[in-house]
Image (cartoon, rainbow, N blue to C red):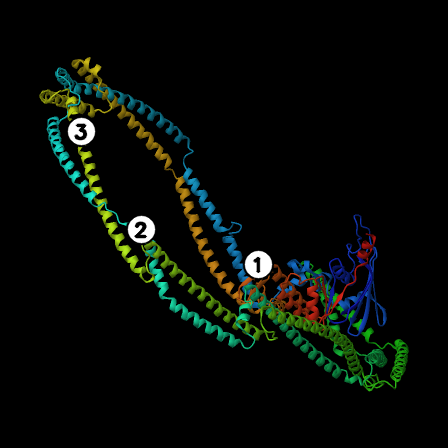
């Protein structure tokens, strides 16, 4: 089916639209946003399948019902149909269909045109917009999904899938990590519960609580007795401690009274006598050293005065040293003057050679005025690039024009060759004659069919008449069988009656006899019926004769009409059409062949008409391209003019050749570099000569200031050497003076140190005497003897104190208090020790009894805690642990099985993919420029997977938006091919489905859709993007610009 015209009376924003479509192939309908492109797609769907409530709803805040009406002109082969649908309350619109033969049944006609394609399939596959293209759910309908996902696995494949599903279910039964369920998880939880019960087992018994309470009470009593025992032991320790400390303490008291009777010298030094003698010896030695240093300082002062003479060159030492530092560089510069002059001469010769290489018209002044700045260089290369770009663009476009012109000529020649059979006749006239011939052939075929049908009816009536005159006898054995059944039944019935009256065996024989009797009656009835049916029916013979006459009369009428049709062929009809005209002796097969040939030629004429329009369109495009070639030639001329003008501005000769001009610029630039080096060398030579002259002038002036006369130019360096020696001698003398002054200062510092040391020694002697309260040496020695006796008493006191401390160290927790020792009574203390030891013995016996009772109670507690409940729980836990181990092993086995089945499934998925996905992979590869190679679906699942060029598998949700849309477009193209193979050839409507593609994939999509439409399909491509329309136009599909909807025009006029 192909749409040739869209006619809208009223639908949404459209009013009175007449939109003819060129024909087969791809038609691009271009218009900006809100032009009504999506509305046109909805209109096509509405005419074919009916209006929806949204289509009949007006605009505004309170929309009212808006009646819709319009029609589609479609062609099915050579048959033209007009499908018109008008709104009708309570329905999807009233549909009427008109064809070449007039008004036909709309449901039958539309059903035949749609080929059984449902509304959902057409909306989601054949007529889609960007929204439907982006959603996978539009491909999930039952009919579409079956074509995409269903694959023929065979018996082995189905067994493998069933085994995989069984193994997967077994794994989920054992462990489902997503839901955290399964046998393994359940067993683990049961083991955790048993662990908690084992931990709490036995702690809830009443006896256990009572025994534990008694144990706690007894523990408290034992703790109190131990506390009392500790107190008594502490008292015993105190009394024993006083017994040990009292003796040493009493002896210490007596020694302290003797020491207090001696005079106390708090800070008498131990080595006081030795120190006093040493200080007196140091004082005598310091006095002698002080006198010696005084004599040596006087001798150094006399030597410094002798080296104080000064040289005149010392006054100008900074300037002399500066000139000495410059002497080396000046000497080097003076030595290189000759080389610099030679280098300048060589560079000048190279400059002259470069100018001669450039040719006539070039001089030193022109070279110096040449502009080779970065700005000029940038302008030169930029203008060269523009000029070359214009040349390349013109060349490419001219080649493209030549290719298209050659192709157009070839198409024109092919068209002329294909129309040779017209013998110069006008194609429209031949088409009308062919259409009339098709009508005649169709009429002749119907008449021929009627003749043969009436002939068959007459023959059948003759056979019925002959059969009615012949009697039909039944076979002899038929009656024999019926009599056998009847007599047997009667005999059995009689036997049953006799047996029933003669015995008491029951009613079974009688019932059996009745059954056989009834069977005999049934057979007799069947015999009578068959005889009645096959007996001659003479009364029907007259009716059959009337039917024979009617059939003969109808056959003769059809024969007369066929003769009239055959005689109506025009005499001036072309031979190619006359040979297809119906003849009286043609059979049905001959008429069918002629009708097929006529229809084929009529379709070829229609195709030729479309190709003729395409040829005219190509000529128009070639005309536009010729204009574009002229524009490009103007661009080249302008670029050439600007190029020559720029060459003149920077100082080069005008040249059309870009390469030659750039080479000349390179040569001139190199010459300019040599010229710049020559100028720089001249400036360097002048600088060095000035530096040498300035150095000599400075030396000459300095000589006048130092020696009273100027230095000759040739003696400057010698004079500097002389001044350097004099400076070195003056520096050596100055260093000698500095050394003498330093030594003199060191001697004075030493004398000051000795004087200070002498004063310090005298102060130390006085301090030592004052420390012991003596005024001279004899008194100091007397006090030293008394101090020695006091030290001996101190040692005895220390020994007594150590005894007291040793006794105290044995009991570190007890303190020695002098008041207790003064009140101490040794007899009373010994009596208290005896009493405390008796009480401690009684407490020890009571503690022994308490510990025995406590052991008995704790034994009973352990007996209760070691009951059977914990053992039972541990046994149950071991059982569950064994089951968990078994379940884990089964899980590992299932995982291994699944791995093997997954490998087998992968091999099945390689070779048993649905035909739809195989075709879709071909289109996807073209749309993505080879990025994605394969589209497939896992066995037993309804999801899509795509393999890229690295054989990496990606799910649909992992693709980018553009790649996902390209995948869905490829699947739809594959589905459309499959529907066509089943007879559903429908127009494809696409609304901006490639808008999200990048430039390269957009071009690939244009090429793919053009090839898809070139195979006899009609594709309507709606777009609001100018660049897409231009891409399709460059591919050979001239865009049709949509007019503006009437409502939009009315709104602007009102506004």
Residue 992 numbered mark, or none: none
Q: Which mark is residue 759?
A: 3
- Look at discs 1 and 2 and give the one toward the viewer: 2
Q: Can residue 345 be seen in this view?
A: yes
Disc 1 to disc 2, C-alpha distance: 87 Å
Residue beneath the point at 38% across and 69% down? 339
Residues tagged 1 and 2 counted as in contact (Cβ below 8 A): no
Q: Relative to the observer, which residue lies in front, 518 or 592?
A: 592
User: In the image, which is nearer the foreground, mark 2 or mark 3?
Assistant: 2
Residue contact at pointers 1 and 3, CB within 8 angstroms: no
Separation of disc 1 and disc 3 at Cα? 100 Å
Q: Name the residue under label 1.
A: 958
Graded by Cα atoms within 10 Å as few (under 14), some (14 to 19) or many (20 or more), the crowding at tag 2 reads some
Q: Is residue 142 left or right of residue 669?
A: right
Q: In terms of image quadrants, where is residue 759?
A: top left
Q: Earlier in the sequence, mark 1 or mark 2?
A: 2
For mark 1, give the secondary structure. Answer: helix
* Number of on-image labels: 3
Q: In the image, residue 878 lies at what x, y percent?
A: 41, 47
User: On the image, which quarter does residue 384 sit in?
Assistant: bottom right
Measuring from the top left, give residue 129's x and y in whole percent: 70, 60
Label 2 – label 3 distance at C-alpha = 49 Å
Question: To which residue does mark 2 refer?
Answer: 317
Mark closest to the chain's N terminus, 1 or 3: 3
Q: Can you say whether 789 is above or below 1003 in the image?
A: above
Q: In which quarter of the image is the N terminus?
A: bottom right
Under tag 3, what secondary structure?
helix
Badge 1 local density, few (<14 within 10 Å), some, or many (20+)?
Answer: few
Q: Do the residues labelled 2 and 3 touch (CB within 8 Å)?
A: no
| Nearer-N-terminus badge (2/3) | 2
């Amino acid at each position: 089916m192909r749409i040739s015209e869209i006619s809208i009376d009223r639908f949404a924003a459209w009013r009175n639209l007449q939109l003819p479509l060129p024909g087969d192939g791809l038609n691009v309908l271009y218009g900006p946003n809100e032009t009504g492109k999506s509305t046109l797609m909805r209109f096509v769907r509405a005419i074919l399948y009916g209006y929806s409530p949204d289509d009949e709803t007006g605009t505004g805040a309170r929309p009212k019902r808006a009646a819709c009406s319009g029609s589609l002109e479609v062609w099915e082969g050579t048959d033209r149909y007009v499908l018109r649908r008008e709104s009708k309350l309570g329905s999807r619109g009233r549909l009427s269909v008109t064809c070449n033969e007039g008004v036909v049944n709309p449901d039958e006609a539309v059903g035949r045109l749609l080929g059984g394609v449902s509304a959902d399939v057409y909306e989601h596959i054949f007529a889609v917009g960007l929204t439907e293209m982006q959603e996978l759910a539009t491909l999930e309908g039952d009919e579409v999904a079956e074509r995409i996902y269903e694959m023929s696995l065979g018996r082995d494949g189905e067994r493998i899938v069933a085994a995989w599903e069984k193994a997967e279910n077994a794994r989920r039964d054992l462990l489902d990590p997503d839901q955290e369920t399964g046998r393994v998880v359940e067993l683990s939880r049961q083991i955790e519960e048993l662990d908690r019960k084992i931990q709490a087992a036995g702690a809830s018994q009443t006896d256990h609580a009572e025994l534990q309470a008694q144990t706690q009470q007894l523990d408290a009593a034992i703790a109190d007795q131990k506390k009392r025992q500790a107190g008594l032991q502490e008292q015993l320790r105190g009394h024993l401690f006083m017994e040990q400390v009292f003796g040493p303490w009493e002896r210490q008291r007596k020694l302290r009274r003797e020491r207090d009777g001696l005079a106390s010298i708090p800070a008498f030094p131990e080595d006081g006598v030795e120190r006093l003698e040493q200080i007196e010896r140091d004082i005598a030695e310091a006095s002698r050293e002080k006198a010696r240093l005084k004599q040596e300082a006087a001798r150094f002062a006399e030597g410094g005065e002798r080296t104080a003479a000064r040289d005149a060159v010392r006054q100008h030492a900074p300037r002399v040293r500066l000139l000495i530092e410059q002497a080396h560089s000046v000497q080097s510069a003076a030595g290189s003057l000759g080389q610099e002059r030679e280098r300048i001469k060589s560079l000048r010769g190279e400059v002259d050679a470069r100018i001669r290489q450039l040719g006539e018209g070039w001089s030193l002044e022109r070279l110096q005025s040449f502009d080779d700045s970065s700005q000029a260089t940038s302008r030169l290369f930029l203008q060269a690039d523009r000029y070359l770009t214009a040349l390349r663009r013109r060349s490419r476009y001219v080649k493209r024009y030549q290719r298209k012109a050659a192709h157009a000529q070839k198409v024109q020649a092919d068209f002329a060759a294909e129309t040779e059979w017209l013998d110069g006749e006008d194609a429209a006239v031949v088409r009308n004659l062919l259409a009339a011939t098709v009508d005649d052939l169709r009429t002749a075929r119907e008449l021929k069919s009627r003749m043969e049908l009436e002939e068959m009816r007459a023959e059948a009536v003759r056979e019925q008449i002959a059969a009615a005159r012949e009697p039909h006898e039944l076979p002899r054995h038929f009656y024999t069988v019926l009599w056998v059944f009847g007599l047997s039944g009667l005999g059995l019935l009689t036997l049953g009656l006799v047996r029933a009256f003669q015995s008491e065996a029951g009613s079974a024989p009688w019932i059996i006899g009745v059954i056989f009797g009834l069977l005999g009656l049934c057979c007799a009835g069947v015999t009578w019926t068959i005889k009645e049916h096959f007996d001659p029916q003479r009364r029907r013979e007259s009716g059959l004769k009337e039917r024979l006459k009617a059939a003969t009369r109808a056959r003769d009428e059809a024969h007369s009409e066929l003769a009239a049709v055959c005689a109506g062929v025009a005499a001036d009809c072309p031979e190619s059409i006359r040979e297809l005209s119906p003849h009286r002796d043609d059979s049905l097969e001959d008429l069918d062949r002629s009708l097929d040939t006529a229809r084929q030629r009529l379709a070829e004429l229609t195709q030729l008409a479309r190709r003729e329009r395409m040829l005219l369109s190509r000529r128009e495009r070639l005309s536009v391209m010729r204009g574009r070639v002229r524009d490009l030639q103007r661009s080249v001329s302008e670029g050439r003019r600007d190029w020559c003008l720029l060459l003149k501005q920077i100082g080069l000769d005008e040249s059309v050749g870009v390469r030659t001009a750039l080479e000349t610029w390179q040569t001139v630039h190199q010459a300019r570099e040599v010229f710049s080096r020559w100028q720089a060398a001249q400036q360097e030579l002048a600088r060095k000569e000035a530096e040498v002259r300035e150095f000599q002038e400075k030396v000459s002036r300095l000589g006048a200031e130092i020696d009273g006369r100027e230095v000759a130019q040739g003696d400057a360096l010698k004079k500097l050497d002389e001044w350097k020696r004099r400076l070195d001698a003056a520096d050596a003398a100055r260093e000698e003076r500095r050394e003498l002054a330093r030594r003199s200062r060191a001697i004075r510092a030493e004398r000051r140190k000795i004087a200070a040391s002498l004063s310090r020694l005298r102060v130390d002697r006085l301090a030592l005497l004052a420390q012991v309260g003596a005024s001279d040496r004899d008194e100091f020695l007397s006090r030293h003897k008394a101090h020695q006796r006091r030290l001996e008493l101190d040692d005895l006191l220390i020994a007594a104190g150590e005894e007291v401390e040793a006794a105290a160290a044995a009991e570190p927790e007890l303190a020695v208090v002098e008041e207790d020792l003064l009140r101490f009574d040794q007899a009373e203390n010994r009596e208290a020790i005896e009493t405390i030891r008796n009480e401690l013995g009684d407490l020890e016996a009571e503690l022994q009894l308490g510990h025995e009772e406590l052991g008995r109670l704790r034994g009973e507690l352990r007996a209760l805690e070691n009951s059977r409940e914990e053992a039972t729980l541990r046994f149950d836990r071991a059982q569950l642990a064994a089951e968990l181990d078994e379940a884990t092993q089964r899980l590992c086995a299932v995982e291994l099985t699944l791995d093997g089945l997954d490998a087998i499934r992968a091999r099945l998925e390689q070779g048993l993919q649905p035909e739809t996905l195989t075709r879709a992979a071909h289109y996807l590869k073209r749309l993505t420029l080879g990025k994605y190679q394969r589209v497939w679906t896992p066995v037993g699942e309804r999801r899509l997977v795509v393999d890229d060029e690295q054989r990496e598998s990606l799910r649909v949700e992992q693709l980018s938006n553009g790649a996902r849309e390209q995948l869905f477009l490829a699947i739809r193209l594959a589905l459309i091919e499959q529907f066509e193979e089943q007879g559903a050839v429908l127009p494809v409507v696409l609304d901006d489905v490639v808008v999200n593609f990048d430039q390269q994939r957009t071009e690939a999509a244009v090429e793919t859709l053009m090839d898809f439409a070139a195979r006899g399909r009609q594709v309507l491509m709606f777009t609001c993007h100018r660049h897409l329309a231009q891409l399709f136009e460059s591919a050979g599909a001239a865009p049709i610009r949509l007019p503006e909807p009437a409502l939009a025009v009315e709104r602007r006029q009102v506004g």
